[in-house]
Amino acid sequence: MSADHFQAPDAPGFKLDPRVVGAFGRFAGGFWRGDTKLNAWGLTLGLAAVLILSTGATVAMNHWNRWFFDSLEARDVEAVTSSVLVFVLIIVAMAAIGVGIVIARETLQVRWRAWLVQQLVARWLGNQRFYHLNVTGKEPPNPEYRISDDTRWATEPLVDLGIGLLLAVVGAAAFISILWTVGGSITFDPGVGPITVPAYMVWVALAYGIIASGLMLWIGAPLVGYVGRKNEAEGYFRFGMMRIRDNADSVALMNGARYEQAILGRFYNTVVARWMAIVWQHGHLTWITNSSGPMIPVVPLLFAAPKYLSGELSLGQVTQLAAAFIQVQIAISWVVDNYNRVAEWYASARRVMDIVTACDAIDGEIAAQSPSMLREGSGAGVSLNDVVIADGSGRPLISDATLAVKAGETVHISGESSTGKSVLVRALAGLWPCARGTLQMPDSARVMITPQKSYLPLGSLKGALLYPEPNLAAGNDKLSAALERVGLGSLVPRLDEVARWDQVLANGERQRLAIARLLIHQPDVVILDDALSALEGPVQATLLARLRGDLPGATIISLGQRAAPDGRHDRQFVLERNSHGAALVPADTPALANAT
């Protein structure tokens, strides 16, 4: 089938933005501040120490090369033997230093990423931001991937890049000094008289490195954008597969596999196209790497050859200069050699900061909406006084809602679709910012809202019953009794079983379990948002009676599209549409649709 109308969203032209780099540094740098600073600085300084020792060992090996080859040239058996013993000691030291580097490096990476994930999860879940970002459409795509995977690619490579940069700086300083002292100066006559170039090997190394690296940077500059666009396409491809998994039942019932396959095929074609752009860019870079790389060990030999042939340099000094030249090139080309990793890191760091920026922005948007509904904690009852609930543009959805429900009273609110029942529930939960008036109800910790499709967390059945308070003091006897009370006694032996209970249980069983959860937690206020709709009328009546009997002092407010049968609630109200949104009126009051 044709998939021309399917298209993954385009990614912005990624470029290294110093503001993003600075923002990430300030946010992720919190690991070196606050409660974790002692551990963070200890790992960082320890890693720096072993890296400097590593450079020292490399310099020692460079000097050993000179000693060994000079001993060979002099045919000094005793010196050659001694050099072999020293070589063994250097190798042992380098191995020990390498072990220290691995442990310090990987520990720092793991601890830093763990801290960053903790901070992002807290920011994303804090103040219900995950909800507000989702309902407003301001949530960055694939936040779960950004938190779980991009945090890895934004921290691990950065530690490796920091290691490489430190080794490059220290190595460049150490080996440039060798080129300076061992290479000395060179004198040549271009026809206008002799010219002496001091430390000529240093200038050769710097010139070669700058020219090669400059060409690499010039040709490789677009790589950052290509990597960013590729990562965005891959993220959207994963999101498409995740949606199929989450909606597997609907897709299968509608026989939509071919349609979904076409969508995924088009999305992955975008991934392939953006990958190929990277491949071609790598091909362009390879012209430079394959041209300059093989020349690196040869260039110092060519420039040192005149002084060796004239007897000014020994064979050991020539090999020492060649090795030092190579190390200087490694240091100079550090940025070039790691350009792709810098691009990968920046793309992930930007995706991480998108989460942080979105969370900060949603706080500002909610504050700018200036909610003026006064929330007060008072007893176990619920009272609304002249409450007006509007949408984001200020259009009223519910107007002048007044309701007083005493502790121990059961009230039902009905209303047609789109009259504002869900909005009212969200306002009661404190999730709807555009509301004004006065709301009196207990603290949110003593209020439980049960939606139509009750959420069941990952883990055991026991955990699903204890949700959202995992440390609730409730033994298995109490949990078992609650299951028996709602008709789920067959699940008692499976309390400790870990499963995808949201998939194992049918809708009706999930709603029964939600009532069992209420019996266990015993809140002061219960709000049932069409929470028994999947059950038959007699079962609904039984569960409401159990709830009323086991929670005699609780305020129970239920909402549904239809009025409840007589006798199940103390009072009933109706949300009736009018020109100002919807009004909350007693069920026996005539409809007010045409009253204004």
Image (tube, grey):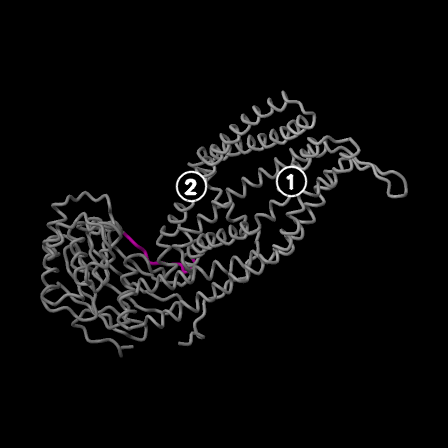
Could you tell me which quadrant the C terminus lies in? bottom left
Inspect the magenta stretch and tell me whether residue 369 lies in it. Answer: yes
List the residue tagged with mark 2: 110
Tell me where residue 568 appears, x and y as whole percent: 11, 64
Q: Nearer the viewer, residue 392 or 292?
A: 292
Tell me where residue 358 appears, x and y as whole percent: 44, 56
Residue 568, above or below 74: below
Residue displayed at 40% across by 63% down = 137
* Dot 2 alpha-carbon crowd within 10 angstroms: few under 14, some 14 to 19, many 20 or more: some
Tell me where residue 484 appears, x and y as whole percent: 10, 53
Residue mark closest to the camera, 1 vs 2: 1
Q: Nearer the viewer, residue 130 or 221?
A: 221
Q: Nearer the viewer, residue 526 or 177?
A: 177
Q: Amino acid at mark 1?
A: Ile
Which element carries disc 2, helix, strand or loop?
helix
List the residue tagged with mark 1: 326
**Magenta stretch in the rendered image:** 368-376
Inspect the magenta stretch and tell me whether residue 26 lies in it. Answer: no
Residue 451 quadrant? bottom left
Q: Work out whether residue 535 can be spotted.
A: yes
